[in-house]
Each structure stands twice: as structure tokens, then as C-alpha cells.
Amino acid sequence: MDAIEALVTRKSSAMLTTPAPSKDDLKTMMQAAVRAPDHCRLRPWRFIVIEGAAREKLGRIFGEALKVREPDATEAMLQKERGKPMRAPLVIAVIAKIEAHPKVPEVEQILSAGAAAQNIMLAAHALGYAGIWRTGKTCFDPQVNAALGAAETDQIVGFLYLGTAERVPVLLEEPVDAYVEIWGE
């Protein structure tokens, strides 16, 4: 698949199954990730690949964090939270490694990590895989951050759930002109 086709046909897919990206394909996806725009070459990202039984460990971390955030969470809520990493055969946590820098504000470092995450999603699609980028309270939870070895100043920008689509997602036509304005005319 060429680059333009990958860009205009990628769509999130929540229903994922095996196979997950192979080791070689994962390496290609990471090569794409580190080509993201990066002011002053800070490399403000970290990628944690979670697969197999490690997904259950991540689920326990999610559950424990939910207990702290919501002490009245029901067992059903906790079970749902613990099961989230099991929704795909492979999960990648994308973390913005933020550092004080005179030329590169925090927001640029987060955007760079986000661009790296998008490159992973596009590369996965181009290689024939599917996925969905998940965020939510878990990404902003200090307990989850610490459990993944991130510094207090770091920010999880998302969990990329990757695998093979159980069914081909429907690609809806987007009204591009509704979002574009030619300024100055």
C-alpha cells in the first residue's frame, strides 16, 4: 500500500483478533514512529510493547488505578477495566517524555509523541493490520504512569490496540471542504 492510500483509508477498528503485528512488522512500525516531527531532536517519546500475559498485568494495573480513582467502583467496573488490554493481541503505550527546554515547550513534545503514535497507526494499516488509539482517564492516572516507569512529568498520549480486524471497518466519506478555509481571499 502506498503512503497516500494508507493516509486516506486508515480507520479505527475496535474489534481485533490475532494475528498481531510480527516482530519484523513491529520494527517497521517503530521505524515509522521515530520519523515523527521532533523540534530540536529531543526524541520525546517512549514506546512500551505489551503482549501475551503482560496484557493481564497491565489490566491489573488499570484495575488498581480505578480503585484509587473511584473507591466505590463495582466489581463489574473493575473487571471491565482489567479486561481492557485483552481487547487486542498487542498494545503499545505511547508516552511523551517531557523535559524542560528553552526552545521546545511541553505541548510540542506531546504533539511529537502523538505524531509518532499516528505514524505507528498508519504503518500498521499499511502492513495490513488494524487498530484503535485509546485514551481516557487511564492515560492521565499517576498510578498507571508510575507503573509503566514514566516520570511524573511524562504524559501517556495513548494506548494503541493492534491486531487484525475481525471485520473490515466501513470507511465513510468525509466532507473535507467543511474543514478547510483558504485564508486571505
Image (cartoon, rainbow, N blue to C red):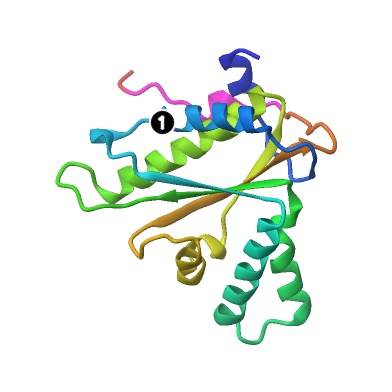
Q: Secondary structure at mark 1?
A: loop
Image location of residue 79, percent across then percent down: 76, 72
On-image quarter of the N terminus: top right
In-front residue for pair 10/131:
131
Q: Is residue 45 visible?
A: yes
Image location of residue 73, percent across then percent down: 68, 82
Residue at left 57%, top 15%? 4
Amino acid type of the residue that numbered disc 1 sits on in the rendered structure: Ala
Residue at left 54%, top 23%? 177
Residue at left 52%, top 66%? 144
Image location of residue 165, percent across then percent down: 79, 36
Q: Is residue 79 magenta?
A: no
Magenta segment range? Answer: 173-183
Q: Quadrant of residue 115?
A: top left
Q: Is residue 174 visible?
A: no
Q: Is residue 104 left or right of residue 127?
A: left
Pointer 1: what residue? 36
In-front residue for pair 138/144:
144
Q: Is residue 140 left or right of residue 160?
A: left
Farthest-out residue, top: 2
On-image quarter of the C terminus: top left
Residue 180, above or below 147: above
Q: Main secondary structure of the magenta part?
A: loop
